Image: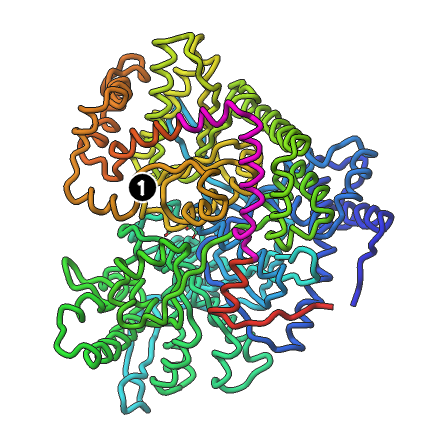
Amino acid sequence: MRSVGSTLADFEQDLISNLYYQRGTTLESASGSDGYQTLALTVRDRLVERYARTAAAHYEANPRFVYYLSAEYLLGRQLGQNLLYTDTERFVRPIAADLGVTLEDLESYDVEPGLGNGGLGRLAACLMDSMATLDIPAVGYGIRYEFGIFKQAFRDGAQVERPDDWTFYGNPWEFPAPDDRQVVGFYGTTAAALDDPTGLRRQWTPGEVVRGEPSHMLVPGYGTQTVNIIRLWQARASRQSFDLSRFGAGQYKEAVEDIVRAENISKVLYPDDSTEQGRELRLKQQYFLVACSLRDIIRRYRLRNTGWDAFPAKVVIQLNDTHPVMAVTELMRLLVDEYKLDWDLAWSITRRTFNYTCHTLLPEALETWPVAVVERLLPRHMEIIYAINHFFLQEVEATYPGDLDRLRRLSIIQEEPDKRVRMAHLAVVGSTAVNGVAELHTRLLAATTLRDFAELWPQKFHNVTNGVTPRRFVRLANPRLSELITERLGDESWLTDLDRLEGLAGVADDPAFLERWRAVKRANKVDLAAHVERSTGVVIDPDALCDVMIKRFHEYKRQHLKLLHVIMLFNRLREHPDLDVVPRTVLFGGKAAPGYHSMKLLLRLVNAVAETVNTDPVVSRRLKVVLPPDYNVTRAQWIIPAADLSEQISLAGKEASGTGNMKLALNGALTIGTLDGANIEIRDRVGADNFFLFGLDAQEAADLRRDYHPRAYYESDPDLRAAIDTIAAGTFAKGDRSLFAPVVDSMLGRDEYLALADYRAYLECQERVEHAWRDQEAWARMSVLNSARSGFFSSDRTVREYCDRIWRVEPVRVA
Ligand code: Z57
């Protein structure tokens, strides 16, 4: 096997060679982009070799593999990570300095692949990182969207979306693998299979055929030799659809239309997070992903195994939410129709192969597809779903004889108000294990959303609390803090054993250490201030409390509750210019789905409040509000290290887990939050004294929602009334009372997520925050304890739990 050199001289040589032979240019004429691309290729070379050794070790060991199926991967920038994982940054700095460029200049060319919306996609990326780090044989499967999550800009404060043409300059981090292409069918008809008396095997003749072309991104482990891959599928017209006769017959336009239709499948990521848009093209995307991936999984299985008996022992497939759940039916179709297994054996193999992670409790995020749509697009799959449901309901009937209502509730098919396929039900029926993503979430799933299933199969339900990778979200994002931690703990082993952060608790009372901890936070805030000024023009004070709410804009997350607090502060400072309040910068970051009008209006209101606050000569000395555009993983890595206060204020019972909460706590932010998702587990670990808790709990929220009158809160709380009236008066719209009227109406009308009910408690909690902030040393101590006690939230721990409880896979060491 060819091997790359490991010295500075080797690295330099390879750079020159790559510049010349890969970029086709010379040092004299290279552009900045050439410099970046060359560096990327040279770093990549170091990973390729490890990947080749990994593939060889995996082939040799023929282990059980984890196949992670996900419609989204939010990977973040690759250059910094791959420099760290190949330990080559130490070469690049001196070489770059010689050439008169900085690493930061080069990094500015690194484009983050935005192949996801938010938490779900970023979790997939963190789990892939941890699997590689723990030497777990794994492949991630996804879609190579030509356009990732849209780029957000603001025009007159309103969100405008621009396409994310992320591969425009070429993507040095991926490898096309055209040899492994697959063919996928859609539409068409089904017919009886001649040789099958049971009628369960049938034949599908698709009406449209599309090719899936794979490429892969390398996923290196940290501190190990393993390099796994994420295989991404792009749709292209199959040769059949290049119907030459049509070209010949003057039907050029029709022939091209077929090509366009095929390529549209992977054209764009659906930009909705935690809401569903039942578009046929989306189902087409989902099936495209699973059909290509299953064929590839079977191809890989057959490299080293024969027959089907060993399939569930060698293959475990994790379904990331319901998006890839059509895989259950597709595996059945492949086994029964194509490989001629009998139904019961095929079903036994299928059920033992899949597991399902649920990421939500919101009814609007639980996918259902109209039967009519599935029937047209995937006629054979619809038949298989009916058959699966038939046998499943027989099972239910045997357990609960005569309980028709229960049958109706459990059925994979919803009958009223229209006939739909419930993807979550199909997932649970087709899987061995079902897991929620935080303790509360799992408990609520079993008690509400999936209650009948939890009663039927209690042993199927598991909790695996989410985690985040400390490599990206501490080491890369926060090098200053990382250095301080390493110095204090004596070595870098905490990066792969995050519980070792507990060692910091011992110095949480050491004034000298606290001084250094604060200096790190302040330096990070100075850096963030530069980013904020560049992107918004607003100058922020690095000594002000940095109060951040970074996440998708969604009503249940309650950005409007935060905004009411900001408006209250604004009113107070205007009325009492000399009031002794804690100087604060409130930083929002997040996108709203392009069709989510109420949240786009809220973004506009945030910008309008920011403008009013920041230009008020009195108020702006103590309060600043900023919303830097286009929040993404890269920007998260700038903001998180500078945060003092982490806003996790969703209505209890709505946020499945949250993972930003973990990233912020690890970087020493204190949380102000509700008893929701993983906030509860964070508080349990960091200690109630080091966490600002407020608001209704999930039970209280559910009870109150049954008979809720937001106006009563408005009328009885003068601060709340004043804040809402300030919006209604047009204060943030140059006197126009109509622009933001829908925000006011929604709060006073339905207030679906009980923001008004939690307002007073939130305000009082913010007063406790101010009080705590006034003792900077005590704050620093709490900050240290937050980091020290958050080691549990490493995605390494999450992956270990999946391995032990669900996947039952063992590591394979790569020499
Ligand atoms: C998404 O980002 C999440 C759930 C969904 O159902 C969809 Br669709 C997208 C998020 C949850 O909202 C977070 O609470 C959770 O931390 C994250 O998934 C990862 O589990």
Report the span colored magenta.
767-796
Residue at the outermost right position: 9
Residue at image point 46% right, 70% down? 294
Closer-to-camera residue (86/37): 86
Residue 435, percent across and down?
40, 62
Secondary structure mostly seen in the magenta stretch: helix
Residue ID for mark 1: 651
Residue at image point 44% right, 56% down? 71
Q: In this view, does 710 lie to the left or right of 567?
A: left
Say what amino acid the circle numbered 1 marks: Leu
Report the label total: 1
Q: Does the residue labelled 1 lie within 8 Å of ligand 1?
A: no
Residue 639, percent across and down?
54, 34
Residue density around tag 1, few if under 14, some if 14–19, many if 20 or more, within 10 Å: many
Q: Is residue 448 left or right of residue 223?
A: left
Residue at image point 47% right, 64% down? 211
User: Does the stretch in magenta take in 773?
Assistant: yes
Residue 469, percent across and down?
57, 50
